Image: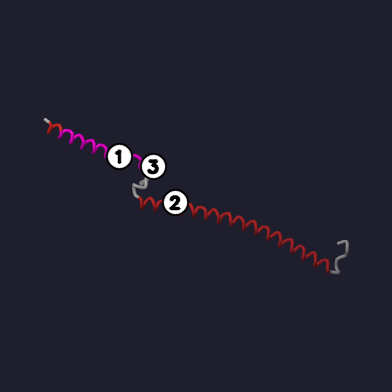
Amino acid sequence: MSVNTFATNAASNSAISYLNNNSRAQASSIAKLSSGSRIVKASDDAASLAVGTKLRADVTALKQAATNASQAGSLLQIADGALSRISDSLLRMKSLATQARSDVLSSTE
């Protein structure tokens, strides 16, 4: 009778072990499905996680570079407008200086 009990306990222990393994695998699959990612934690695939993390960092850096380039373009447009106004003012000053030296204009003009 004790041999039969031992065999029953071994079989139930084996069944419990398989059940626990399957439950862990199911929980891992559900976590992956719900996250929408193949890698949920580092132990799933450490190398792929590292590559993915680096790619995310690269994308973030490129987005920031694009933002910086856009802001630099805006700054250059502002500077171009300011230089254009300065150029217009200098041309007007040159014109007035030329007229002031000319004997053609009277003091009222």
The Cα–Cα distance between marks 1 and 3, rounded to whole angstroms, is 16 Å
**Secondary structure found at label 3:** helix
Please tell me which residue is depicted at 78% across the width and 65% down the height of the picture: 95
- The residue identified by callout 3 is 35
Q: Quadrant of the C terminus?
A: bottom right
**Secondary structure found at label 1:** helix
- The residue identified by callout 1 is 24
Q: Which mark is residue 79?
A: none
Residue 51 located left or right of residue 101:
left
Instruction: Indicate yes or no whether the magenta region holds residue 21.
Output: yes
In depth, the one of 96 and 15 nearer the eye is 15
Neighbours of disc 3 within 10 Å: few (<14), some (14-19), many (20+):
few
Residue 88 located left or right of residue 33:
right
In depth, the one of 30 and 86 nearer the eye is 30
Neighbours of disc 2 within 10 Å: few (<14), some (14-19), many (20+):
few
Bounds of the magenta segment: 6-35
Characterize the magenta stretch by its predominant secondary structure: helix
Instruction: Indicate yes or no whether the magenta region holds residue 27.
Output: yes
* Vertical arrangement, residue 13 with respect to residue 100, above or below: above
The Cα–Cα distance between marks 3 and 2, rounded to whole angstroms, is 16 Å
Coordinates of residue 55 in the picture (x, y in percent): 43, 53
| Name of the residue lying farthest toward the top | 1
Q: Quadrant of residue 79?
A: bottom right
Please tell me which residue is depicted at 38% across the width and 50% down the height of the picture: 49
- The residue identified by callout 2 is 56
